[in-house]
Image (cartoon, rainbow, N blue to C red):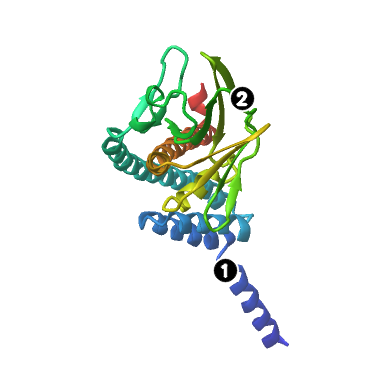
Amino acid sequence: MRRLNSIIFVCLLLVACGPSDEQKAQKFLEAAKLSYQEGNYTRAKTELDSIKIKYPKAFYTRKAGIRFMLEVEQAEQERGLKYLDSLEIAKQEEFQTLQKDYLLEKNKEYQEIGYYIIPQQKLEQNLNRSYLRFQVNEKGIMSVTATYAGKKGINLQTVKIAAPDGSFVETPISDNNFVSQNLGIVSEKSDFKRGKDGDLIPFILMHHDKDLKVSYLGDWTYQFKLSAVEKKAAIEIDKLAKVLYTLTEIQKAKEEALLKLSFIASRKQKNDSIDHPEQNN
């Protein structure tokens, strides 16, 4: 009996002397710090999350983990900003190279955002013509303007483009229309932004090497063949749009990263004020 009691006592002693939750949680904290030093921020955050999940009662280590999580998140955002800066420089250089081949139409008195076009589609060179005009704004949003000119208006509603194989696309009705009349010529214009154009722009880009028939549909139908200049405009504007859109998205991502860094800084300051209340006096 004495021997049994001794065995039980030793077992209880071993259990009592085993590592505490704080000690176990500390291993995850150390692993997180190692991952941080290696630049693996995702793994570091996973290790820190494990502390909260596995050892919720390890108060001091959890508190240290929360503080260190802010360090990890800050380093992550700073590394992201550095990458975005380098990407922005590369895209700006690409834009500067392309820019010389386009014209920027912008009236600074009433336009906050201008539009790039190719020189062959200047308004002055296309007066009283029915054609498709392609442009991209400074934020990278591409659009196409269906322009009709004739002695009789057609009440332009939608635009249809058909390829020789019978495939076609048709736009929805535009919510941006303009009608004018000058010297007996009726001019109608309908704008369609990419993504809201019934895939008109992607269809032209995909079939630019084929004869494409354009149909303006309204009270009656007006048809014409898409010219080589119009095809070129679609291709060239699409190329510039990709660069401008990427630059816009980079800027948005940088602004978001800066906001996160500001939030992290305020959280770190709050934690410091809790740990050192005398700083508030």
In the picture, measured across the screen, residue 153 lies left or right of residue 256, that is right
Camera-nearest label, 1 or 2? 2
Q: Position of residue 270 (x, y in %)?
A: 53, 32
Q: Position of residue 9 (x, y in %)?
A: 65, 77
* Quarter of the figure with residue 39: bottom left
Please identify the quadrant where the N terminus is shown.
bottom right
Instruction: Determine crowd level at label 2: few under 14, some 14-19, many 20+ residues with C-alpha closer than 10 A.
Output: some
Which residue corresponds to the image point at 41% horizontal and 58% vertical from the top-left? 35
Q: Position of residue 124 (x, y in %)?
A: 38, 22
Q: Amino acid at mark 1?
A: Cys
The answer to whether mark 1 and mark 2 are in CB contact below 8 A is: no
In the picture, measured across the screen, residue 92 lies left or right of residue 211, that is left
Above-or-below relation of 218 to 15: above
Location of mark 1 (residue): 17
Instruction: Determine crowd level at label 1: few under 14, some 14-19, many 20+ residues with C-alpha closer than 10 A.
Output: few
The label shown at residue 50 is none
Q: Amino acid at mark 2?
A: Gly
Above-or-below relation of 265 to 5: above
In the picture, measured across the screen, residue 131 lies left or right of residue 12, that is left
- Going by the picture, which residue comes out furthest to the right? 1
Q: Secondary structure at mark 2?
A: loop
Which residue corresponds to the image point at 47% horizontal and 53% vertical from the top-left? 206
Location of mark 2 (residue): 153
